[in-house]
Image (tube, helix red, strand yellow):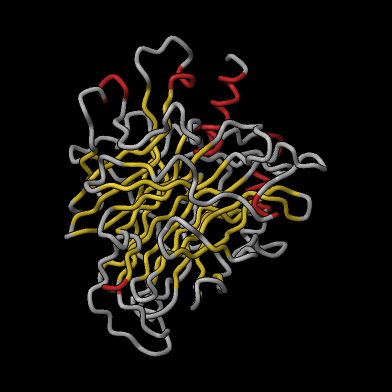
Amino acid sequence: MLLRSRPLVWSWDAVATCVAILLASGCSSARNDAAHTSDAGSDAGDAACTPDRPTCSPVAPQANADAPATTTDGAALHPRGFIGDPSILLEGGRYRMWHTSSRTTTPCAGQWFECLVQGFGYAESEDGQRWTPHRLPAADAEMATLVFEPLASGWDRVGVETASVLRGHDGRLWMFYTGHRTPNQPDLPWDAIGLAFSDDGLTWTRSGGAPVLEPTLPWERVCDDAACLKPWGGLLEPSVVWEEDAKRYRMWYAAVGTLADVPTYRIGTATSPDGLTWTKHPEPVLVPGAVGAWDAYVVSHVNVVRDPCRGYHVFYHGYGAAEDARCAGGTCTGYTPGSIGYAFGEDGITFERASTPLVTPKAGAWDAFFVGGPSALFRGTDIELFYFGNRDLERANAFDSQVGRVTLSCAP
């Protein structure tokens, strides 16, 4: 998505939007018991809680993943790197991952990007490092098997990305996701949040024919004219938990709107008793940092995990002036280099963020240019953080990414 006066911030959103434009032109109390909370499939066990601190307080900076995840035979998770935005559950000692991906339609009469379908792939792992992707026979020709993808007649027909998968109050798998509309529709920003259900994680049923959360607040859309006839921006990248003790769903999401006359991302939150009807907090709960901060330009792609003892851990993607300078002159045609930040809050609304990034690109490594798309979970008293990254400027696009994992170091 193009942020005016700033470089191109490439996300799966941008992939879908760019493909759509090309086609149109012809070419995230003192004790929160883990057993009463369904978030990112955490397995917290019996955390020894103290009244004044969470189970883990991650310390910045953290070490990067030594190597990206692979298949069980050591191959890349996707042959072309069409992978990002992991959403991880840990159930019965088994990791389950849904991730943004693309397949190629066959036969394809146009250019390669005209034949892409953007949706979600799926994989399982015993150790979180070596994975078995779900692949049907057609994947040999299509490069990937998608377990969820747009409907040709659906509101999200342009593409879907960035899933947040959890066990809902009814025991089923619930998947909240970003859906992309066809651009330039009257009074309809491009992005909104949809919902689907599944018993097995492979076959999904949509909740109705419309989004469950729309951009309705002024800071959730961008207007290019006084009447705002054809707004863009919208809501994307949800992170959702079910809180059994409060009998409610809580969602955090990124929104694209205008701040100081510049389009940018901010983080909002909403609650719901049933996952279908939502009440938004009226103002953003996380905004770009102060001038000079590492995240002064953008905060986006939020992932929130409820601590087994108290409060909420927030992981997010961000960048500031230094990354902006690296992209001077339009050299970053894909992702803008950025890092993963961390914040903590007792109530899920007011957060105290770390002054430095939690995970940054590591020179010379597989994630040397970009890290983002965090997905965290508790395993015992440890927090495991999954994310995706790119090696260099040439590979800084949605078609050459890999996924890694780190176990975070906690403050003593």
As displayed, is residue 95 above or below residue 16? below
Where residue 73 sits, quadrant-wise, is: top left
Q: Position of residue 115 (x, y in %)?
A: 44, 19
For the view shown, which residue lies furthest in the bottom direction?
A: 51
Q: Going 43% across and 55% down the picture, which residue do you hit? A: 374
Examine the rendered structure and indicate whether residue 216 appears above or below residue 410.
above
Residue at far top of view: 109
Tell me where residue 341 appears, x and y as whole percent. Answer: 52, 61
What x and y, as percent, mark residue 313?
Answer: 44, 69
Residue at 42% x, 58% y: name it: 275
Residue closer to the observer: 172 or 253: 172
Quadrant placement of the N terminus: top right
Q: How many marks?
A: 0
Q: Residue at x 29, y 45 (%)?
A: 69
Q: Residue at x 63, y 52 (%)?
A: 216
- Which sits in the foreground, 380 or 219? 219
Left or right of residue 343: residue 70: left
Tell me the quarter of the image containing the C terminus. bottom left
In the image, residue 35 lies at what x, y percent?
Answer: 26, 73
